[in-house]
Image (cartoon, rainbow, N blue to C red):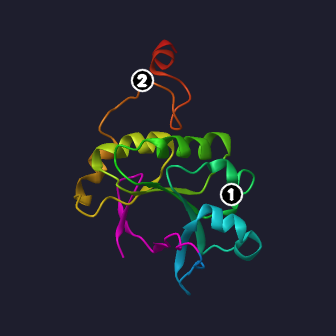
Amino acid sequence: MPDLITLDGSIRNDDWAVVPRPADGDSLAVPEGQRSLIPADLWLAGHEHYAGREDIGVWFDSHEEPEVLAGKVNELPVIAVNFPKFSDGRGYSIARLLRERFGYNNELRAIGDVLLDQLQFMKRCGFDTFALREDKDITKAAKCLNFFSQGYQAATDTDEPLFRRRAS
């Protein structure tokens, strides 16, 4: 299994399998006995079957809207957001919406084309675990999570912008 980086910079084994979206006409194949992340819309379509299961989480692609899970997000132990390429920033917005608008409080994971220089920005948007792209050095991740000592703007990790923090 690949490794994950956590918010404190530690590395842990990833025991969740990302189940790809089935081709048109095919059914979803969830591996038996394996914690699995399935496409969010398919989880919603099979909600009566998947509800309450701690071994099933979901993943969003960057073009999908998290609103589809409004009111149900905290039923999920893990939500992953796929970054199909490092230059696609829509996943940052999905993370902020899940945390701030929909109140998601469980594990929020960044998957896909995740690079070291993105980690601190992903953290500020609400991600708390990160699956780095395979060709990146995971041992450098802890330093990248806290590269800057302060952020100027408010985010999920602070409610006030820097100018207000300095004034108080």
Give x and y (percent) for residue 17: 47, 74
Q: Secondary structure at mark 2?
A: loop
Q: Which residue is mark 1?
A: 74
Residue furthest to the front: 25
Report the amino acid beneath label 2: Tyr
Task: Give the vertical position of 34 relative to 41 (above or below).
Answer: below
Q: Which residues are magenta?
A: 1-24
| Residue beneath the point at 37% across and 42% down | 120
| Residue beneath the point at 70% across and 62% down | 75
Q: Nearer the viewer, residue 24 or 51?
A: 24
Name the mark on residue 133: none
Which quarter shows the N terminus? bottom left
Q: Secondary structure at mark 1?
A: helix
Give x and y (percent) for residue 147: 29, 38
Q: Nearer the viewer, residue 158 or 76?
A: 76
Q: Nearer the viewer, residue 34 or 23?
A: 23
- Image mark count: 2
Report the amino acid beneath label 1: Asn
- Left or right relative to 146: residue 82: right
Query: Picture quarter containing residue 97?
Result: top right
- Left or right relative to 21: residue 120: left
Q: Which residue is mark 2?
A: 152
